[in-house]
Amino acid sequence: MNDPIASLLTQIRNALQAGHESVTVPASRIKHEIAKKLLDGGYISKLETVGEAPKTSLLITLKYVEGSPIVTHIKRISKPSVRIYAGKKRIPKSLSGRGITLLTTSKGILTDKEARAAGIGGEIICQIW
């Protein structure tokens, strides 16, 4: 597992396409922060930490509306091989503001709106809509 963030996003994408109710992924601090931003944005319905240290996992309950998943696209932007950074004035909007862009900044994982409000840029992790 060379890119744990891409693995998390792929597992969520695959579970949504398969119509699963939830997905369990190995826990880490950054995965928890990303999942928390998805929860805050209304893209998942529940987030739980299960198991005992050191083998904790995140149980992510997915969100559907009338049988269709809320999330239609998840795109990894910055990768370990090619890092993509954006200054505070160049943070992209996902789907003209209807989705979210997640960034890792000096203040932790932030959405595009939070980063613009704080006036900071960072590494673009992914876009979700």
Image (cartoon, rainbow, N blue to C red):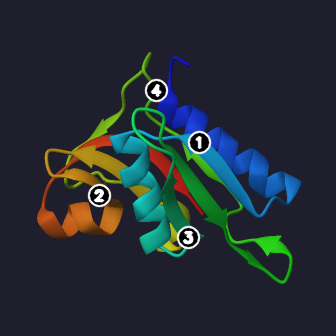
User: Marks 3/2: CA distance?
Assistant: 19 Å
> Which label's residue is closer to the chain start, 1 or 2?
1
Viewer-nearest residue: 26 or 121: 26
Regarding mark 3 in the picture, which secondary structure is present there?
strand
Q: Residues within 10 Å of mark 1 (few under 14, many from 20)?
A: some
Q: Is residue 24 left or right of residue 101?
A: right
Q: For the residues marked 1 and 2, what is the alpha-carbon distance in whole angstroms? A: 21 Å
Mark-to-mark CA distance, 1 and 3? 14 Å
Disc nearest the viewer among 1 and 2: 1
Residue 93 visible in the picture: no
Q: Decide: is 118 above or below 6.
A: below
- Going by the numbered disc 1, the residue's amino acid type is Val
Q: Earlier in the sequence, mark 1 or mark 3?
A: 1
Circle 4: residue type: Lys
Q: Mark on residue 110?
A: 2
Q: What label does residue 79 carry, if any?
A: 4
Locate residue 52: give its quadrant.
top left
In this rendering, would 121 be left or right of 75? left
Name the amino acid, label 2. Answer: Leu
Q: Residue 39 in the image: state x and y as whole percent.
A: 48, 69
Which of the labelled discs sits on residue 46, or is there none? 3
Marks 1 and 3: CB-CB under 8 Å?
no
Instruction: Write the residue at 43% across / 56% down.
Output: 101
For the question of whether residue 31 can be seen, the reply is: yes
Tell me how many marks there are: 4
Sequence order check, earlier mark of 3 and 2? 3
Q: Is 36 displayed left or right of 47 in the figure?
A: left
| Nearer mark to the viewer, of 3 and 2 | 3
**How far apart in space, not on screen, are marks 2 and 4 (Cα)?**
17 Å
Dot 3 and dot 4 residues touching (CB under 8 Å):
no
In percent of the image, x 23 and y 60: which residue is there? 115
Q: Choose the circle earlier in sequence order: 1 or 4.
A: 1
